[in-house]
Image: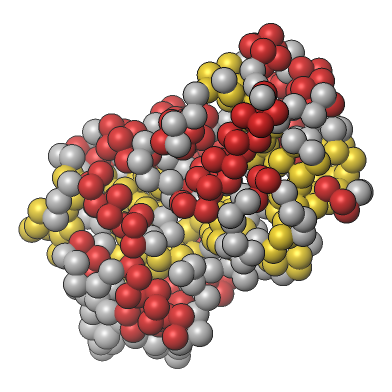
């Protein structure tokens, strides 16, 4: 069972639909105990960074998520669910994040249109099971104004060129998180979700 | 490189896809869920559902269609038509839409743009601008092609293009962005349904000043029109309805031909 983390912010419907489509069993929950009991966890996110952190605190999920990832249990962050893992974000002021991955979340510093909306390509920076069968240069769907800047480059899974190369996915063991939306990236995205489910199954066996 | 998006638009009325010539005389072009899946298979980058009667008849948007489509199609959706309140935005996003496009409500009450952006993020808020050229004496506006020197004004229209306002479209585009819009969906009411080409002059003037993506809408009849909207009109995405609905062209046809002309597309 995979926990789809509900903290009153994320667009759970889309992720839930995609999981259902690939026949993945999941439970939508904001309960730290249920998350701890799950074999894998997904943190989606839509909205503003500060509001999302406030909700994670209110739901008592900050420690639950930190513990989950610290134990290297399979975890997938999507969009804001990637950014929230970082030390801090500059979105609408300055907000502390979960600080699971050292680094910052910054606004694009170029003069291209912001938000970046649409399909862009990913360049692979490491081999990982979460990207198995995904061709280098695949198009995935992005909607964001901010991007992550990890201190440790070894966590970088993919980069994408929008004005400059930014980090579009990170991976550390069983932690995988994407700036793009796999649940909105047609076949390529569904493939990544299936890969994640496979890492959950592998970790559980 | 960020690809230019090709967006089929499903104009929906009473649960069916329709597309009117200048918003009257509907022709039935099929079931929305089936069509959405068909577009997804062809490589559509995004889908837009427009409940074209909602503003006129004050009905809720087509949440059920969005819900059913979102269960089987995994590309982004925008839903427009009849989105009037923050609750409408929330309900629509909850049904599976990624974005809402707001038109009439945003002209009447621009605060909804800001509030929507603050609550759900700018990226969810598409501000739709239905613009029509202002008739001027001695000027022939029948050709909507490039007209860089002509003094043209476009006014925003509401209620499916039926009501004129005194709001200048270029001014409104700037304002919408300042208020927090994530994208602009620009429809020429002069071109809409004619299939004679987008109003590329309108698109270019809005795109030149916009710091957010601009989606071209209204008038697509050929691939050349789409190329013009991207090239001359400087748009980030092109939306079309009837050109795709009657299966004259597939999204793949359009993309292959645009790619051959150097436009970055997702193939």
Residue B238's spot in the image, x, y percent? 40, 68
In this figure, what is the number of numbered marks?
Answer: 0
Question: In this orientation, does residue A118 appear?
Answer: yes
Taking the view exactly as shown, the residue that stands out farthest to the front is A205
Q: Tell whether B16 sits left or right of A35.
A: left
Rendered view: B143 above or below A189 = below
Residue B109's spot in the image, x, y percent? 45, 41
Residue at point 71% right, 14% down? A36
Q: Tell whether A83 sits left or right of A137.
A: right
Please say which color scheme the image uses: secondary structure
Residue at point 74% right, 54% down? A127
Observer-nearest residue: A193 or B87? A193
Rendered view: B234 above or below A183 = below
Quadrant of the image containing the N terminus of chain B: bottom right
Residue B80's spot in the image, x, y percent? 35, 45
Q: Tell whether B210 sits left or right of B29.
A: right
Question: In this orientation, does residue B216 appear?
Answer: no
Residue at point 58% right, 30% down? A10
Residue at point 62% right, 66% down? A137
| Quadrant position of residue A83 | top right
Residue B60's spot in the image, x, y percent? 28, 32
Q: Tell whether B35 sits left or right of A68.
A: left
Rendered view: A32 above or below B98 = above
Observer-nearest residue: B6 or B204? B6
| Quadrant position of residue B73 | top left
């Amino acid at each position: 069972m995979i926990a789809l983390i509900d903290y009153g912010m994320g667009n759970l419907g889309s992720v839930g639909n995609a999981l259902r489509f690939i026949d993945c069993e999941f439970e939508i929950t904001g309960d730290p105990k249920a998350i701890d009991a799950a074999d894998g966890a997904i943190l989606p996110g839509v909205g503003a960074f500060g509001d999302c952190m406030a909700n994670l605190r209110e739901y008592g999920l900050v420690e639950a998520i930190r513990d989950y990832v610290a134990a290297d249990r399979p975890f997938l962050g999507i969009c804001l669910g990637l950014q929230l893992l970082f030390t801090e974000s500059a979105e609408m002021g300055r907000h502390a994040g979960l600080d699971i991955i050292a680094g910052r979340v910054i606004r694009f510093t170029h003069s291209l249109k912001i938000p970046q909306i649409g399909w862009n390509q990913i360049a692979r920076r490491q081999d990982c099971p979460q990207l198995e069968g995904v061709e280098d240069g695949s198009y995935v769907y992005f909607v964001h104004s901010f991007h992550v800047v990890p201190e440790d480059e070894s966590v970088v899974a993919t980069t994408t060129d929008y004005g400059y190369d930014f980090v579009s996915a990170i991976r550390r063991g069983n932690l995988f998180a994407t700036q793009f939306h796999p649940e909105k990236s047609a076949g390529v995205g569904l493939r990544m979700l299936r890969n994640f489910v496979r890492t959950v199954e592998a970790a559980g066996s | 490189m960020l690809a230019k998006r090709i967006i089929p638009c499903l104009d929906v009325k009473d649960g069916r896809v329709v597309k009117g010539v200048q918003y009257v005389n509907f022709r039935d072009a099929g079931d929305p869920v089936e069509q959405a899946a068909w577009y997804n298979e062809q490589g559509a980058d995004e889908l837009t559902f427009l409940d074209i009667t909602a503003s006129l008849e004050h009905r809720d948007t087509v949440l059920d269609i969005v819900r059913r489509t979102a269960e089987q199609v995994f590309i982004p959706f925008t839903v427009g038509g009849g989105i009037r309140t923050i609750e409408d935005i929330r309900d629509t996003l909850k049904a599976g839409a990624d974005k809402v496009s707001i038109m009439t409500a945003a002209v009447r009450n621009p605060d909804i743009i800001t509030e929507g952006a603050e609550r759900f993020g700018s990226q969810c808020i598409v501000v739709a601008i239905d613009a029509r050229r202002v008739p001027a004496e001695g000027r022939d506006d029948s050709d909507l092609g490039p007209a860089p020197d002509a003094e043209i004004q476009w006014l925003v229209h509401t209620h499916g293009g039926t009501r004129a306002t005194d709001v200048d479209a270029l001014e409104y585009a700037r304002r919408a962005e300042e208020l927090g819009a994530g994208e602009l969906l620009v429809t020429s009411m002069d071109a809409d349904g004619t299939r004679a080409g987008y109003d590329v002059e309108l698109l270019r003037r809005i795109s030149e000043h916009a710091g957010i993506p601009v989606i071209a809408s209204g008038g697509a009849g050929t691939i050349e029109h789409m190329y013009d909207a991207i090239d001359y009109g400087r748009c980030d995405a092109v939306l079309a309805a009837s050109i795709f609905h009657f299966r004259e062209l597939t999204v793949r046809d359009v993309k292959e031909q645009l790619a051959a002309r150097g436009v970055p597309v997702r193939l």
